[in-house]
Image: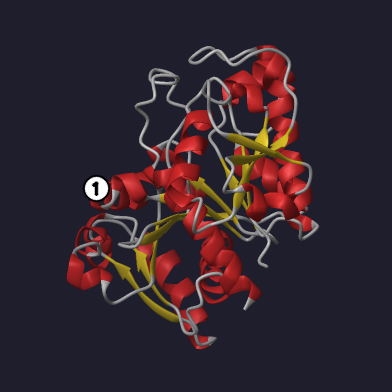
Amino acid sequence: MTAPVALTCGEPAGVGPELALRAWEALAGTLPFFLIGDPGHLPEGAPVSEIADPAETEAALARGLPVLRHAFDGPRRPGRPDPAQAQSVIDVIARGVELVQAGRAGALCTAPIHKQALQEGAGFAYPGHTEYLAALAGVDDVVMMLASDMLRVVPATIHIPLREVPDALSAEGLTRTIRITHAALRRDFGIEAPRIAVAGLNPHAGEGGRMGREEIELIAPVLDALRAEGLQLAGPLSADTMFHGAARARYDAAVAMYHDQALIPIKTLDFDRGVNVTLGLPFVRTSPDHGTAFDIAGRGVANPTSLIEALKLAAKMAAARGA
């Protein structure tokens, strides 16, 4: 039996608990996964099947949402994070990593956390999930991919002001991003010879230097060097013509130069089904592409689609990696 996917509970005051239950309702017969968290934080009356070990997941699915208990201080208060629970949120993530690294879980899927709550309640020293997971795994270089059936896209720079992007781009960083993306497409998505499209930074990819020289002086030399190693790369391309249907058919993933250049296309094309994937880890990690949604937590109206897709992609990537 393939090891089940471990789903961390995330911030209890957010929509994670109710979405975990909705995901079980949708996937119970097809995809073994278990939740790491406090059963008392699930919606009242939820069918829960507590397990003592991930190996019990498949047998437990028919009885309810399999939950590997991790006790928290206090009840869940939808929309109101409790500082006393912050350390437990962090500990659940670490526990999930331990299980997947030990082979007792096949992949890790993480429900959303609230970084401010973790920083204020437990002195969380990381910008977010991704950096903490990289530290736990002992790796320096990880890459964020947003993926759906319609598009896979990787931003070369992420959460920085737009005015800082040109200085943040470097030949070493871009090379590293493309290499990690190429390796992940082969290992985790089963694409033997990946085709990667790379956007330019400036409008019209700089238009021959008339609207910027980053394409000429930075991006093109990186692509030429990697092509010499056998990578199939297109670019630097004008970003405004990269994401229509015919263009997307010509590549397996796109690398963009900054956050919005990457995320606007996928969120426009497939908002509900986008999945956040961390590339470069020694294990598979996915996450829904949304936050804690405190404003609707506890009301039962949150859309579970992104979490369902994140669990499905985690299982698919784990199977590809195993093959």
Judged left or right of residue 250, residue 162 is right
Coordinates of residue 255 in the picture (x, y in percent): 41, 62
State the image quarter where residue 69 is shown.
top right
Instruction: Identify which residue is drawn at 45% across, 75% down.
Output: 223
Color theme of the render: secondary structure
Judged left or right of residue 293, residue 1 is right
Coordinates of residue 96 in the picture (x, y in percent): 71, 45
State the image quarter where residue 204 is shown.
bottom left
Q: Is residue 218 above or below residue 43?
A: below
Coordinates of residue 95 in the picture (x, y in percent): 76, 41
Question: Can residue 276 be seen?
Answer: no
Front residue of 45 and 72: 45
User: In the displayed image of the protein, which residue is found farthest to the front?
Assistant: 63
**Type of amino acid at the residue the image marks with label 1:** Thr
Question: Can residue 10 be seen?
Answer: yes
Q: Is residue 294 above or below residue 191?
A: above
Coordinates of residue 279 in the picture (x, y in percent): 57, 59
Front residue of 83 and 258: 83
Instruction: Identify which residue is drawn at 30% across, 62% down.
Output: 150
Residue corresponding to mark 1:
268
Judged left or right of residue 176, residue 299 is left
Instruction: Identify which residue is drawn at 27% across, 61% down.
Output: 206
Q: Is residue 13 above or below residue 202?
A: above
Q: Is residue 298 above or below residue 278?
A: above
Q: Say few, some or many: other residues with alpha carbon within 10 Å of mark 1 (under 14 / 14 to 19 / 20 or more).
A: few
Instruction: Identify which residue is drawn at 34% across, 74% down.
Output: 251
Q: Quadrant of the N terminus?
A: bottom right
Front residue of 34 and 265: 34
